[in-house]
Image (tube, rainbow, N blue to C red):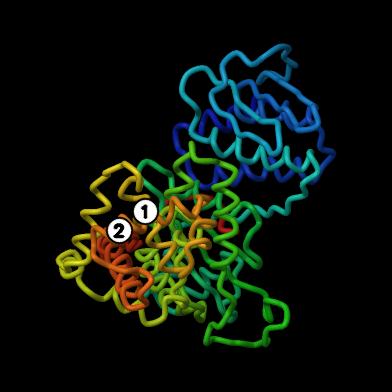
Amino acid sequence: MTAVKGLLLRLSALDADAATAVRVIAHFEALLGGGLDPVSLTRSTAALAGCAAGLELPDGRSARFGSAGVALLGAPEQVSGRVDLEPAGRVWLERPGAPGPFDELVLEWMAITARVLAGRPRRTRVPSAADPALVELVLSGREDASDRARALRLLGLDPEAPLRVAAVAGGPGTDVGVETVALLGRGSLHGIVRVAQVGSVGAVLVQRPIGYPAGSEPGDGPSGRTASPAAELRAALGERLRDRGPSRRSAHAIRVGVGGGADPLDARDSWAQARSALRFAGTGTPEEAVADHDELGPVALLADIPVERLRAQADVRRLAKLECGDRGGRSGHGSDLLDALAAFCRTGSLRQAATELHLHHSSVAARLAHVEDELGWRLRDPQDRFRAQLALYALRLADHGEGEGDGHGHGGRGTGDGG
């Protein structure tokens, strides 16, 4: 069994996809459901990763095992990756050479499991990695309704219950299918969740139980007023950012667009809205990284403006220049300036913006002062703040382009049995 588990990740180096990520998460979910202890967690992680693994808990318990299941003594020889626990402790892998393609995911979920050992309960649920061909068929506007209904049933979805679609994008060099599964694998979404990679974007289909959330009116019907998963996605992304920390940039590059509710046979409408909302999403804080089409309201109409016109607008040009300036100094880099501006425009409060960015309010004030000096705005003025917010949206739309995540074609990879 140990050899089989080690082989799982060795083979994943040849084809890193969402199905392998599901297996990794399912491995730790199985541990969470059984008789968990430091020895079993560390030994099984080492077998899964195919290299030595170690654990130190805040209460002083520790373990270290090689991939063959033999306990190791002494300090680790070569730590290839680690995640710190709070208030103390850590988990780590000891892989010679470069980290494996799933080492970050293994470490993240080893840390989640270790926190349960330390007395912090965690609910998890593994999302189902679906057949991309079925997902593309559901999201297509070209197929017959009967074919779309059959695909929905094969995915384990109800063709008559409203659903929502989300689109997930990653930064350069990230495997968006893996990142999507890792984000959703925290059990953050209630209902039936199906995940596939469609083109360069992760597609997420979410179908809630009738009447969810508690207290809502049942039978909202085909109008699709099913509860948005945006808040849950922001919470999951926030946890993921905390777990990975500033040294693991892939989590910071994740952006999500959430479409409106729709009849499942018209899922393409929610998919189009999700891809449009994705263009409004920024990197960094969860509040900026998850854009909900419903929350955007009439602002979503900005996505209809050609990219060339957006880029030519004077405020957008000046923001782009500020972002690329990388001036450093007292106010931070260009991207830091725009992060501060976005947080302040959204919250309208210097202290709330500082809390969101995990900075002292004086640091945020200095960055905003720099923005005001460069652009001639007075951000305490509601009109200037509204203008700045529109310019930020326009800059993101211009950066992300009209065709981002169009999901056309059949570029998705096989990632499972479709649920």
> Disc 1 and disc 2: Cα gap in Å?
6 Å
Q: Give the residue drawn at x 67%, y 14%.
A: 75
The x, y position of residue 93, in whole percent, is 60, 25
Mark 1 near mark 2, Cβ–Cβ under 8 Å?
Answer: yes
* Location of residue 190 in the rendering, given as x and y in whole percent from the top left corner: 66, 66
Q: Quadrant of residue 407?
A: bottom left
Q: Nearer the viewer, residue 14 or 182?
A: 182
Q: Is residue 87 left or right of residue 414?
A: right
Residue under pointer 2: 371
Task: Give the image location of residue 67, x and y in percent.
Answer: 66, 21
Secondary element at tag 1: helix
Extreme residue in the right direction? 35
Residues packed near mark 1 inside 10 Å, few (<14), some (14 to 19) or many (20 plus)? many
Find residue 367 and name its label.
1
Identity of the residue drawn at 30% across and 73% down: 387
Screen quadrant of the N terminus = top right
Residue 87: assigned label: none
Disc 2: CA contacts within 10 A as few (<14), some (14-19) or many (>=20): many
Residue 155 in the image: state x and y as whole percent: 57, 64
Q: Amino acid at mark 2?
A: Val
Query: 165 or 361, which lies in front?
Result: 361
Residue situated in front as seen by the camera: 149 or 355: 355
Quadrant in which the C terminus appears: bottom right
- Above or below, 347 against 412 in this view is below
Q: Amino acid at mark 1?
A: Arg
